[in-house]
């Protein structure tokens, strides 16, 4: 299990939407202490390995996964990303993260 499975995105530990954050909290609360420890150990291992999302290998793997998807799966993926981006932009504008007075 990785944090990406909980809707984590480009902005680090802040999930794009409230639903993802709620899902993560629910799943975390159901985990036993040993499962939580295993989860965090895996997370730390990936950090120590300096896994690069933009390496050739990582990009090839994502491309291969994309090509195996059906058109319906691709459409659902794109819609999910659009929704997450819109949610994030709405949140950022609401908190004036861009430094502009509204």
Image (cartoon, rainbow, N blue to C red):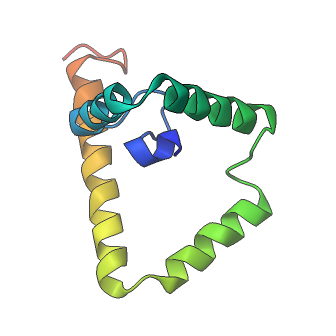
Q: Residue at x 75, y 44 (%)?
A: 51
Q: Is residue 21 above or below residue 77?
A: above
> Where residue 26 sits: x, y (%)?
27, 31
Residue 12 at least partly seen: no
> Where residue 33 sits: x, y (%)?
49, 22
Q: Residue at x 46, y 41 (%)?
A: 9
Please count the marks in the image: 0
Placement of the C terminus among the 4 image quadrants: top left
> Where residue 12 sits: x, y (%)?
51, 30
Image side of residue 6 versus residue 61, left or right:
left
Q: Residue at x 31, y 17 (%)?
A: 100
Q: Nearer the viewer, residue 11 or 98?
A: 11
Q: Which image quadrant for residue 73?
A: bottom left
Q: Which image quadrant for residue 37?
A: top right
Q: Residue at x 48, y 27 (%)?
A: 13
Q: Is residue 36 above or below residue 97?
A: below
Residue 51 at least partly seen: yes
> Where residue 4 sits: x, y (%)?
48, 45
Image side of residue 52 versus residue 40, left or right:
right
Q: Is residue 65 above or below residue 52?
A: below
């Amino acid at each position: 299990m990785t944090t990406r499975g909980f809707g984590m995105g480009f902005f680090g530990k802040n999930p794009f939407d409230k639903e993802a954050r709620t899902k993560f909290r629910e799943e975390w609360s159901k985990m036993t202490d040993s499962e939580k420890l295993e989860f965090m150990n895996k997370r730390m291992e990936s950090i120590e390995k300096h896994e690069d999302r933009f390496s050739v290998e990582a990009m090839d793997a994502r491309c291969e996964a994309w090509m195996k998807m059906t058109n319906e799966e691709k459409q659902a993926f794109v819609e999910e990303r659009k929704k997450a981006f819109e949610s994030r932009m709405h949140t950022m504008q609401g908190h004036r993260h861009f430094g502009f007075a509204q």
